Amino acid sequence: MGRRPARCYRQIKNKPYPKSHFCREKENVSSEALEVARIACNKYMAKFAGKDVFHLRVRVHPFHVLRMNKMLSCAGANRLQTGMRGAFGKPQGTCAREALRRAKFKFPGRQKIIVSKKWGFTKFSRSDYLKFKSDNRIVADGVNAKILGNHGPLANHQHGRAFLESATA
């Protein structure tokens, strides 16, 4: 049996889940490639999901500087150049040394999709997030979530928030 056409796999049947692309190779991803990948993902999601329905984060800082040792290719170039002596080169651009990205088709190498065990972009697992949410111990903080501790004045505590069992016993 061959594979079905791509239009058959467009609809997502189950609950949405966060995914990440992991590359199996160490690569240099240029800042231009990162920007093009971000634009491509953003354009596709805005077109098919709507502008306010998704959140996309490309978490990488291209600080690694690419350098190029320019070589002449004209006649008599061997008199002007020193070859590989002092070949540090001039800065040409920046890139990121990186093994994790989302926009797979814009980058070289083989990537693999891994389903996240976290709840969205938070640092909490799904079971912990649901438990904290039912206890009113979590508050939304942008695309992230903050856990409320048991310290501080009582006026700052939310009404109806469950305290720890040791405090009520």
Image (cartoon, rainbow, N blue to C red):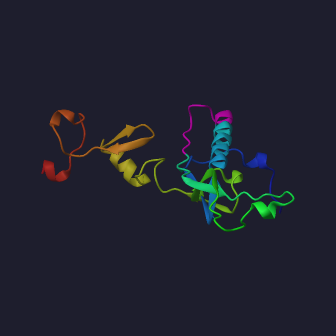
Instruction: Specify the farthest residue to the left.
Output: 169
Residues drawn in magenta: 46-57
Answer above or below: position of 120 versus 116: above
Residue at 39% over, 43% down: 145
The answer to whether residue 77 is seen in the rendering is yes
Instruction: State the residue in front, 110 or 137.
Output: 110
Secondary structure character of the magenta stretch overall: loop
Q: Note whether 66 is above or below 136 in the view shown.
A: below
Q: Name the residue at 63% across, 36% down.
A: 49
Q: Is residue 150 left or right of residue 43?
A: left
Residue 69 location, x and y as percent?
Answer: 69, 59
Q: Examine the image and state in which quarter residue 52 appears.
A: top right
Q: Tell which of 109 and 44 is nearer to you.
A: 109
Give the quadrant of residue 161: top left
At x 42%, y 54%, the residue is 125
Q: Is residue 55 magenta?
A: yes
Count of picture labels: 0
Question: Which residue is most to the right?
Answer: 75
Image x and y of residue 143, in percent: 45, 40
Based on the picture, tell me whether residue 140 belongs to the magenta stretch: no
Residue 41, percent from left and from top: 65, 42
Vertical placement of residue 73 versus 103, above or below: below
What percent of the width, then of the height, locates residue 27? 63, 62
Tell me the quarter of the image containing the N terminus: bottom right
Q: For residue 102, say whether it is visible.
A: no
Is 25 left, or right, of 118 in this rendering? right
